[in-house]
Amino acid sequence: MALSSSLDPVISKVISVLENEASLQTEVGAEIDEIKLELKAIKAFLEDADRRSGVAPMSETDKQWIASVRDIAYEVENVVDEFMYHFNKQQQWRGKPSRFFFKLIHFPKNLLVRHRVAVELQDINKRIKSIADRNQRYQVSRSESRNFDKQIGGEYHRNNWVKNLSESALFFKEDDLVGIDKAQSELLDWLMDQELQRTVISVVGMGGLGKTTLVANTFKTQVVKQHFGCCAWITVSQQYVVTDLFKSIIKSLYNKAKEKIDPVINLDSMNYLELLEELVNFLQPRRYLIVIDDVWSTHLWQDINIALPANMNGSRILLTTRKEDVASFEFGVLKHIFRLKHLPLKESMSLFCKKAFVGKGGQCPPYLESSAAKLVAKCQGLPLAIVALGGLMASKNSIVEWSEVYNNLNRELSENDTYFERLKYISLLSYHDLSYTLKQCFLYCCIFPEDYEIKRNRLIRLWMAEGFVEPLKGTVSEVVAERYLTELICRGLLQVVRRDRSGRPNAFKMHDILREFTVSISKSVKFVTKSDGMEELEDGGIRRWSIEAKGKEMKGASETALSRVRSLLVFAVDETSKSSFNRLPSGFKLMRVLDLEGTPINELPDELGNLFNLRYLNLTRTLVKELPRSIGKLYNLQSLVMKYTQIKELPAGIVKLKNLRHVIACGYNVDPTTFHYAWGPVFPSNICLLDNLQILSSVEARGDFIKQLGKMTQLRVLGVVNVKETDGQNLCLAIAKMIHLRKIGVTSCNEDEHVNMDALESAPPGLEKLFLAGKLEKVPHWFISLDNLTGLWLHWSRLRDDFLPHIQALPNLGELKLVNAYEGERLDFLEGFQKLKLLRIGRCLGLREIVINKGVMPGLQDLSILGCQEFTTLPHGWESLPDLKRVYLSNVSPGLIQKICRSKGMDRQTITGIVLRRQEGTEAIFNITEWLWIGKAQQPKQKLSDDSVRRASCRNCEAEKSLVVAAPGHVMAGEVGFHDVVPAVMDRMAEDIGLDLQARGHDVRQQVDNGVAGITKCLVQDQADTGHVGSPASDRSNGTCA
């Protein structure tokens, strides 16, 4: 129940404050006790209601009652936060020399505030009682209501409806199915192979993906019927009774086997043991197939395993589930997992046309092709959504009608039950099955724009700031939140769009259709308010405000509305909107979350310090150059994120923030092969006094910072730059105490300074990522023991001796980047590297060849050789590496590039870089899909102004699908790269310097000299390919900028 889950953190927080704030209790003790009791009763009721949600629709009476309770709970939170706001200001003044004058002036004001709080709480107490009385007078008995629901055909009872939907799939016509041939072929291979052992086959995927349809169509094929002696189909769902399942299997078996049940047998009168015996006796001599549809729990296998004999007859159990943990469960028998994918665009369009143009033979009229394509794209390959939307559009004929549906799809999905009730029900089954806590975590994800890539760490910190993460003794909140995230992924509610080389999810999206339903729920319970900044919002109980700024001018909300906002996230969707948001509006005095990532705000007001309730501040990719000194007042701040900003130094007051857990202030240079690749601002040396910090990255080492670092034993991520060789001993002593450390990044003060890490006896046991930048005489002796290491970056190490034997046996190493790390002519990968997926070698100027022995790095997917100008030959047999997908060569020996180009039918002397990708469906055929050529520099029409450089240097605007590789204010070299930029921006850049670029999506590199720019290089990308040359932002991390 979204209404209740949205209230949980509010009620829990208010109860906690009321119990612990002695200053408030002394003034209004009676009201406090009364409200605490009421809120606890409300919380218990809502949790109970939440457990029943999804079984039957909530009555209008209950909806109104819960909405009233929600508003009351929010008002209590407002009153308490308002008091704490004034109390906090008083506490800040107490330590000042003018304390006497403050008391003299503000004592009457404090009495007034407390009196007002007492009056407001008394009023709220009365209203709570009146709401309860009113509900009692007008509601229909809940027991009567539930009985009524059952009497009207049972269509809303979850298990009955799901069972009907499941079994109806057995009667779908083959002509109505699209895109299942390949999947069905794989299932048939597993069902009818020569394996005699009992085998479990799991088909897994999100709701609406067509799991049941695929399995049903396979189940009823003639070859399956002939292969198995008996077959049964049962539907399970969330709640089941084991004896009922046994009865269903027995009935189905006898029915499919065309055998009559012995009239002596009365299934309804049989107990568990009798049913079990009957089932085992029937199945034992036969080769059987049991389909178990819609499995939600691994407990099911424990309940029915004993009834399905392991008879060595080639029997199969085929199950469908939307939960990854069920599919991956160790059943104790042979198993296969089939992960059903979304329909490709071509098949999606075919399925849609079958439903939308029934009278036209499934053919889309030319004048509707564009509109149909847009609607199909919204479905993102989800068959159930495609079918539902196709059914709706079958009655629409004009372009105007189609456009109206597309522009109002959110409303259609929410309100048009005629076509979308089934889609909504199936899509939200996973949501309704979530725990009380996970529901609010999932609802929160709709705060991001459509198709937005949600980063793992960002979402986790936001959840923590919102109070969604429940404390678990002995486990840090970050780990608990990551478990929440894993659960949502396993249930198919979030789709992974990017993983790191160890397979850990890094970024996610919500499916468009599921997101529309979630937005609708969120809006109805006032969980998140979304706007485009075009109109001023009136006060309607705004708690979390998501602004997707689209216009030239962004309007805000009334002062009253702003004063109640707890969370503000701003997303600058296009270039015009970025110019309209350059200062933070005032009035957000009770703010908990402020996320301005990617907005062009350039100044934070000093009033920021008044946001005593602020837990999370994100300034990533903004134009902010300094933090206000008042930031030291943000006592409750947990996360301060300042990636890729122009902030050079943090104010001294930051050391007062005792609740800080994450301080992230790092950036990367345009060219990943330069020495000064990673950078960070100057921190106060006594930052080490903050003993709650989990992440500190990246901090510039000055003064006695390294000596003080040993106090931070709780750190999980550490990035430090400007380290001197003489700091090595103290740095190693500090790291030795950090037993929880997962990621380390260390950069020396200059390219000739040694990184002295030998004094470290052993690395932290859980270390996963390591970045070392600076000269190394040899690799540290403890490298060989890094059993949990997944990523290793050696930057400008300039090792002379072969170091690969020290790391080849690391069991989990998935990513290895070597930039100017080796001075020899040859690298020999003779053995090991069994988990390696990415190998990148850059700027090893003497390197001529690499050798990869057979059986080494069998899982390698990506190989890059960059800036190794003497490199003349690829390793023997590289095409036969089974998992290799991409090879990127740039600025290597011209002869090697030309040789490969000629072999592929290209002969261009000016090509300096190529990308080779494996041709799909082949074992050893690679094609050139992208290439980089150098052209004559064009003279610009005008000099580049600072403002134009800053605009052009904006990084990673997800809403625009653009990526520009220059960080604002941090162009460290004389070359600026622009990659995959919005076509209009690219055209304007080219026009400014007098160059005509016909092809879109080019990578242009401009040579900058005192503001004069000329295009010197252009990347041409094959139109059939969507990959990118170079190092995208997500791939440039040194592992410590979390």
Image: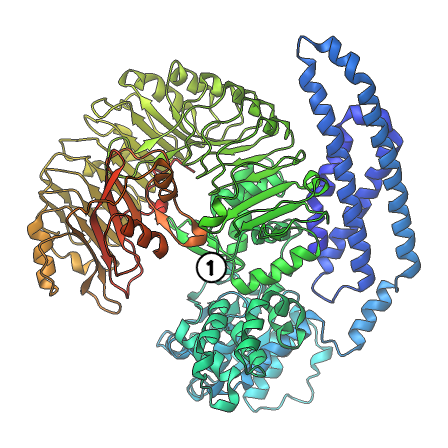
**Rendering coords of residue 626 (x, y %):** 47, 27
Comparing 714 with 949, the one in front is 949
Pick the quarter of the image with the N terminus.
bottom right
Assess disc 1: are there few (<14), some (14-19) or many (≥20) residues with their C-alpha within 10 Å of its C-alpha.
Answer: few
Report the label total: 1
Q: Does 121 sit left or right of 1040 as displayed?
A: right
Residue at the image point whose x is 29% and y is 31% from the top = 772
Residue at the image point whose x is 76% and y is 79% from the top = 153
Dividing the picture into quarters, in which one does residue 100 lie? top right
**Rendering coords of residue 809 (x, y %):** 25, 42
Q: Does residue 462 lie above or below 735 as drawn?
A: below
Residue at the image point whose x is 33% and y is 52% from the top = 988
Q: Which residue is mark 1?
A: 330
Residue at the image point whose x is 69% and y is 87% from the top = 264
Q: Amino acid at mark 1?
A: Glu
Pick the quarter of the image with the C terminus.
top left
Q: Does residue 366 lie above or below 449 as drawn?
A: below
Residue 579: in sight, yes or no?
yes
Residue 287: in sight, yes or no?
no
